[in-house]
Image (spheres, rainbow, N blue to C red):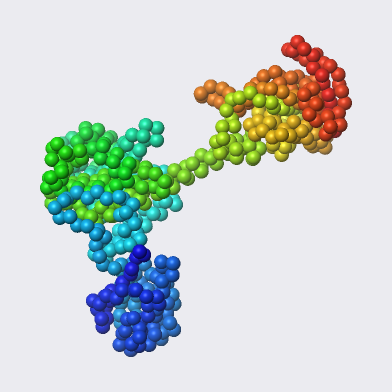
């Protein structure tokens, strides 16, 4: 069932009356057929109406003489949210949720509540909203805090600032002595404390014992905390009484000492695995928390634990507790903590997604230096196309004829400019014809066709790339190049050590392509026999003859592709 709103008249002739908005339109004015009737002469006969559209409550001025104000701003129409004030004449109306307890069960004999976390969220968001907070000003503070946390969904790219904000919100709105944020380790699947917060009652005592601060400094930090909110330890840092590094080191040592006493791993795991929210209002009054059965929070008077509910999985949990018998957590606080945990979890997913996008962008930028856009997309999708395997490929080698003499004539800077122009042409054409740049070696370049992305026409594509490269270089009329192409079986994939891997091809097919390039004259394209067999009906060719290739016992039948 969707949320039902009420209008509470806080100022005016009907102060204290409450009107449920059960129909749409809901009309306000002086005439008797309005849903709320005011006798105030500054109110028009049909002054305003509220319509419900797609779950939104929209107020609209019906052409009144004196208009309407929403939060002291004159409007013709506006979307209303709980806590908004509407002024009509001398009357002020506060929009609020229907007043009823968000928990249908209230077991006074049992101080422990175990409830599906998503059920709580459903009740809070869809049915009862934030009516569990009677005080309007407190509700507005909480809504503001939740809004700040929700903004991190779109803003933060790191997890720690999200958790820092989460702890600040909890401390301002829930009287918790200690707060744990626990995250599931991706590799071990174990749950580990990521961030721990403690208030004065524990931190102050420990810091005093360690002689890191004085009583006067503690009182000053405590006073600042009460005034501004936030964490006690942070206030000590802000006042300059302790460094952040010292505080973090201290807290880390304390948590490691007390870890076994603080948490029950079995219950944390249950909260996460079953996606339940757990409230122990008073462990000492609960018969189930005897020594033999206290699987959770032994020695703790009141505690709550909720899962970090993401969109698809549970990322961790938030745990809070109190040793103080006078402060017991309530159902209202459990609902609030569940909501905070859900927002924090979604923010974490957002941060992880942005990190993944950034990593993919960096990977894509790196890969695009060597592969065509089509191949890059396949690699990013993680289809295992870069795994080492043996397959048929076509290898293209190209270099500049008499490059050593040319570079001596030009000088370093002009040579660098020439090479950049030359390599740009090679990359353009190799990528255009779905090839990959394997490597640059001085003025030489090696390209692969048919890997990692295999296409039926990869050999034809290699020759088309070679022809276009030759044509563009010849048009420059600055230098001449030679190209060798060979087709055959090669070992191809990510090859190297654990410290440095590169996508490459190795084998006799590669070596012969390199020898054919060295054999070719200026402006020539030489291909091996297997390449020739696949492209002879597509391109004009001529036989060069059987040639002796360096490093190979058997001779190679060589052909020239005519441009």
Residue at 78% x, 29% y is 534
State the quadrant of the N terminus: bottom left
State the quadrant of the C terminus: top right
Q: Position of residue 131 (x, y in %)?
A: 28, 63
Residue at 36% x, 81% y is 28
189 with respect to 382 (left or right) = left
97 with respect to 375 (left or right) = left
* Residue 48 quadrant: bottom left
Q: Position of residue 500 (x, y in %)?
A: 54, 25
Q: How many marks?
A: 0
State whether residue 330 is above or below residue 431: below
In this view, the residue in front, 351 or 239, is: 351
In this view, the residue in front, 429 or 294, is: 294
Residue at 14% x, 53% y is 109
Furthest-top residue in view?
Answer: 553
Q: Position of residue 170 (x, y in %)?
A: 28, 51
Look at the image and tell me whether residue 246 can be seen.
Answer: no
State whether residue 283 is above or below residue 134: above
* Residue 2 quadrant: bottom left
Residue at 43% x, 70% y is 53
534 with respect to 220 (left or right) = right
State whether residue 479 is above or below residue 12: above
State whether residue 174 is above or below residue 15: above
243 with respect to 446 (left or right) = left
Q: Position of residue 23 (x, y in %)?
A: 37, 75
Look at the image and tell me whether residue 541 can be seen.
Answer: yes
């Amino acid at each position: 069932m969707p949320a039902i709103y009420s209008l509470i008249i806080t100022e005016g002739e009907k102060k204290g009356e409450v009107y449920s908005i059960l129909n749409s339109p809901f009309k306000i004015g002086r005439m008797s057929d309005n849903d709320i009737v005011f006798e105030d002469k500054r109110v028009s006969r049909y002054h305003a109406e509220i319509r419900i559209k797609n779950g939104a409550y929209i107020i609209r001025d019906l052409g009144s003489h004196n208009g309407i104000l929403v939060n002291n701003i004159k409007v013709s129409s506006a979307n209303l949210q709980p806590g908004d004030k509407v002024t009509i004449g001398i009357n002020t109306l506060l929009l609020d949720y229907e007043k009823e307890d968000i928990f249908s069960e209230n077991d006074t004999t049992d101080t422990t509540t175990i409830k599906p976390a998503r059920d709580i969220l459903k009740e809070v968001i869809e049915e009862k909203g934030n009516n569990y907070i009677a005080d309007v000003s407190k509700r507005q503070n909480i809504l503001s805090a939740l809004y700040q946390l929700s903004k991190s969904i779109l803003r933060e790219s790191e997890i720690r600032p999200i958790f820092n904000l989460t702890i600040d919100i909890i401390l301002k709105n829930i009287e918790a002595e200690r707060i744990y944020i626990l995250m599931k380790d991706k590799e071990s699947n174990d749950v580990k404390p990521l961030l721990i917060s403690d208030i004065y009652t524990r931190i102050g005592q420990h810091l005093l014992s360690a002689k890191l601060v004085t009583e006067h400094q503690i009182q000053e930090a405590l006073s600042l905390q009460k005034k501004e909110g936030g964490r006690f330890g942070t206030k000590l840092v802000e006042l300059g009484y302790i460094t952040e590094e010292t505080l973090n080191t201290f807290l880390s040592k304390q948590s490691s000492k007390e870890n076994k006493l603080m948490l029950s791993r079995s219950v944390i795991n249950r909260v996460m695995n079953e996606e339940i929210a757990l409230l122990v209002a008073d462990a000492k009054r609960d018969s189930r928390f005897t020594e033999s059965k206290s699987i959770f929070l032994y020695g703790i008077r009141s505690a709550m634990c909720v899962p970090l509910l993401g969109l698809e999985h549970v990322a961790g949990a938030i745990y809070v507790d109190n040793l103080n018998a006078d402060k017991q957590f309530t159902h209202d606080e459990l609902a609030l903590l569940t909501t905070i945990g859900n927002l924090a979890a979604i923010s974490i997913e957002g941060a992880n997604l942005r990190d993944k996008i950034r990593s993919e962008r960096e990977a894509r930028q790196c890969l695009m230096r060597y592969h065509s856009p089509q191949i890059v997309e396949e690699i990013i999708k993680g289809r295992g196309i870069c795994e080492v395997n043996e397959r048929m490929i076509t290898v293209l080698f190209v270099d500049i004829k008499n490059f050593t003499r040319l570079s001596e004539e030009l000088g370093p800077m002009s040579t660098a400019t020439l090479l950049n122009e030359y390599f740009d042409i090679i990359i353009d054409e190799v990528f255009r014809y779905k090839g990959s740049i394997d490597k640059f070696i001085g003025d030489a370049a090696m390209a692969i066709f048919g890997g990692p992305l295999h296409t039926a026409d990869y050999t034809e594509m290699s020759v088309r790339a070679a022809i276009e490269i030759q044509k563009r270089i010849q048009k420059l009329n600055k230098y001449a190049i030679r190209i060798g192409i060979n087709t055959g079986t090669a070992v191809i994939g990510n090859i190297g050590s654990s410290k440095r891997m590169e996508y490459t091809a190795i084998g006799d097919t590669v070596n012969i392509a390199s020898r054919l390039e060295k054999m070719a004259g200026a402006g020539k394209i030489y291909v091996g026999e297997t390449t020739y067999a696949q492209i002879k009906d597509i391109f004009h060719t001529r036989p060069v003859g059987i040639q002796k290739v360096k490093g190979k016992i058997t001779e190679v039948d060589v052909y020239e592709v005519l441009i």
